[in-house]
Image: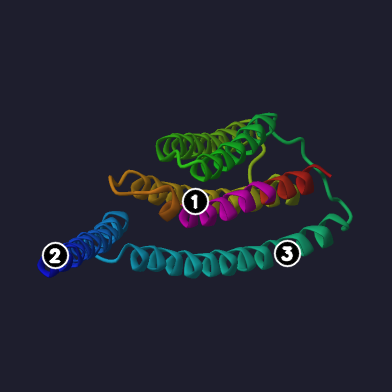
C-alpha cells in the first residue's frame, strides 16, 4: 500500500518535467523564429531593424540636402525676379507674346506632380509595383515637359524672338532655361528612385523616405514653374 500511494506523485513530477521541456522548446523556437523573421525583414542577412534605421538616417540626411538646394534655388530666382522687376519699369520695355506651347507644357508638369503623389499613395498601401509604375510615368511626363520647353524655344527663335530681340525675350530664355536645368536635376533624382524601386528586396517602408524627398523637390520645381510663367505673363 505505501508503494502504491507514492507512485502517482512521481508520475506527476515526470509529467510536469515533460511540460516544462515542451514549454522551453517552444520558447526557444519562438526566439529562433523571431530572429529568423528579423533577418527576413532586414533583407541584408542581419538585423532588420538596424537596416531600416540606416535607411531612415539616409533619408533624413537627404531631406536636409533637398531643403538646402531648394533654399539656394529660391535665393537665385529672387535675384532674377528683382532684376526683372527693375528692368520692366524702365522706358522702352516691351512684353513679348509668349509661345502658346507653354500652356501645354504647364499642364504636363502639373500632371507629373499628381503622378508623383500617386507614388506616395501607393507606397502607403504597400504597393511597390504600382508605385514604381507611377514613378516611371512621372519621369516620362517630366521628360515631356523639358522636350516641350526646348520645342518652344526653337519655335520662338524661328519666329524671330531671339535672345537679342528685347530684354523681355532675354529674360524669357534665362528664366525658362534655368528652370529647365533644375527640372533635369529632378529627372536624375527620378531615375535614381527607379533604380531603388527596381531592387528585388525593396519594401514600401524602406522606399517611403526616398519617394518623399523626390516628391519635395519635384513639387518645388512645379510650383517654381507656375511662378516663372506668371511672372513672364504679367
Q: Is residue 166 visible?
A: no
Identify the mark at residue 7; answer none if there is no mark: 2
Helix, strand or loop at label 2? It is helix
Residue 27, how many percent across, how many down?
Answer: 27, 63
To which quarter of the image does residue 156 belong? top right
Q: Residue at x 46, y 42 (%)?
A: 126
The location of residue 195, given as percent across then percent down, is 34, 47
What is the number of the mark on residue 211?
Answer: 1
Left or right, residue 149 beside residue 81: left
| The residue stretch that appears in magenta | 208-223
**Picture layout, residue 20 above or below residue 215:** below
Q: Is residue 211 magenta?
A: yes
Decide which of tag 2 and tag 1 comes sooner along the chain.
2
* Left or right position of 174 against 210: right
Q: What residue appears at the point 53 percent right and 45 percent down from the top-left corner?
A: 124
Between label 2 and label 1, give the one nearer the viewer.
2
Considering only order in the chain, which callout, 2 or 3, is on the residue closer to the N terminus? 2
Residue position marked by numbered label 3 in the rendering: 78
Tag count:
3
Residue at 24% across, 59% down:
26
Mark 1 or mark 3: name the one nearer the start of the chain.
3
Say which of 135 and 9 sits in front. 9
User: Is residue 188 placed above or below 151 in the rendered structure?
Assistant: below
Q: Position of residue 10 (x, y in %)?
A: 15, 67
Magenta span: helix, strand or loop, mainly? Answer: helix
Q: Disc 2 and disc 1: Cα gap in Å?
A: 70 Å
Looking at the picture, how far across and down is residue 58, in whole percent?
43, 67
Image: 94 above or below 42 = above
168 drawn magenta: no
Q: Which image quadrant for residue 25?
A: bottom left
In this view, the residue farthest toward the front is 1
Amino acid at each position: 500500500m505505501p508503494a502504491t500511494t507514492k507512485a502517482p506523485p512521481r508520475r506527476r513530477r515526470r509529467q510536469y518535467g515533460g511540460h516544462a521541456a515542451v514549454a522551453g522548446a517552444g520558447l526557444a523556437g519562438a526566439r529562433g523564429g523571431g530572429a529568423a523573421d528579423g533577418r527576413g525583414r532586414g533583407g541584408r542577412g542581419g538585423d532588420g531593424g538596424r537596416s531600416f534605421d540606416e535607411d531612415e538616417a539616409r533619408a533624413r540626411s537627404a531631406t536636409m540636402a533637398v531643403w538646402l538646394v531648394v533654399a539656394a534655388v529660391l535665393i537665385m530666382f529672387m535675384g532674377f525676379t528683382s532684376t526683372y522687376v527693375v528692368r520692366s519699369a524702365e522706358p522702352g520695355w516691351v512684353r513679348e507674346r509668349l509661345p502658346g506651347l507653354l500652356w501645354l507644357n504647364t499642364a504636363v508638369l502639373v500632371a507629373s506632380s499628381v503622378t508623383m503623389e500617386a507614388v506616395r499613395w501607393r507606397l502607403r498601401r504597400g504597393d511597390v509595383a504600382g508605385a514604381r509604375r507611377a514613378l516611371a510615368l512621372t519621369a516620362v511626363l517630366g521628360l515631356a515637359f523639358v522636350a516641350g520647353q526646348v520645342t518652344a524655344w526653337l519655335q520662338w527663335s524661328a519666329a524671330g524672338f531671339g535672345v537679342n530681340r528685347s530684354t523681355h525675350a532675354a529674360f524669357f530664355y534665362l528664366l525658362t532655361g534655368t528652370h529647365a536645368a533644375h527640372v533635369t536635376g529632378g529627372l536624375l533624382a527620378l531615375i535614381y528612385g527607379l533604380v531603388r524601386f527596381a531592387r528585388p528586396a525593396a519594401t514600401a517602408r524602406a522606399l517611403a523616405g526616398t519617394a518623399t524627398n523626390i516628391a519635395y523637390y519635384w513639387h518645388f520645381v512645379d510650383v517654381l514653374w507656375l511662378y516663372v510663367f506668371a511672372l513672364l505673363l504679367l
